[in-house]
């Protein structure tokens, strides 16, 4: 499984972390996610700017080439 950066169509709330700034994955046990960490698509802010959207697009392109 590869974790690509989430690209928004326009600046605003991050689609990957839904604006919380925390990315969670894995099983949900008693309402608590098993794994959590800072969302790298928005740098933990919960919002993506135009610069971050461009950066994520570049990152995803390079990731596909080297995988």
Image (cartoon, grey):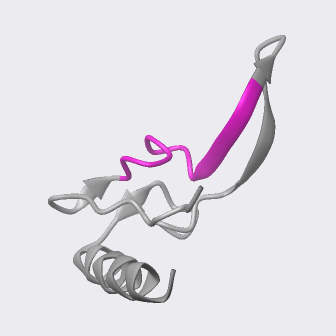
Q: Is residue 10 shown left or right of residue 22?
A: left
Is residue 32 positioned above or below 25 on the image? Answer: above
Quarter of the image where one finds residue 20: top right
Tally the marks.
0
Query: Per the image, is 31 magenta?
Result: no
Relative to 16, say whether 55 is above or below: below
Specify the quadrant that holds the N terminus. bottom right
**Which residue corresponds to the image point at 26% horizontal and 55% vertical from the top-left?**
12
Can you give x and y, in whole percent of width and height, for residue 33 in the image?
Answer: 76, 30
Q: Tell whether position 20 is magenta.
A: yes
Image point (76%, 15%), residue name: 31
12 relative to 66 in the view: left or right: left
**Position of residue 29 in the picture relative to residue 19 (left or right):** right
**Residue at 45% across / 45% down in the picture?**
19
Q: Position of residue 23 (x, y in %)?
A: 62, 48
Task: Give the camera-side residue of 55 and 4.
Answer: 4
Image coordinates for residue 57, horizontal then vertical, percent: 29, 78
Furthest residue to the left?
10
Residue 43 x, y percent position in the rendering: 54, 70
Name the residue: 39% across, 87% down.
Answer: 65
> Magenta residues?
14-27
């Amino acid at each position: 499984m590869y974790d690509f950066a989430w690209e928004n169509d326009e600046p605003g709330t991050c689609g990957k972390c839904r604006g919380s700034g925390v990315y969670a994955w894995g099983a949900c046990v008693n309402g608590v996610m098993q794994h959590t960490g800072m969302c790298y698509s928005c740098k933990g802010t919960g919002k993506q700017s135009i610069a971050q959207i461009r950066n994520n697009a570049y990152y995803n392109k390079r990731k596909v080439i080297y995988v």
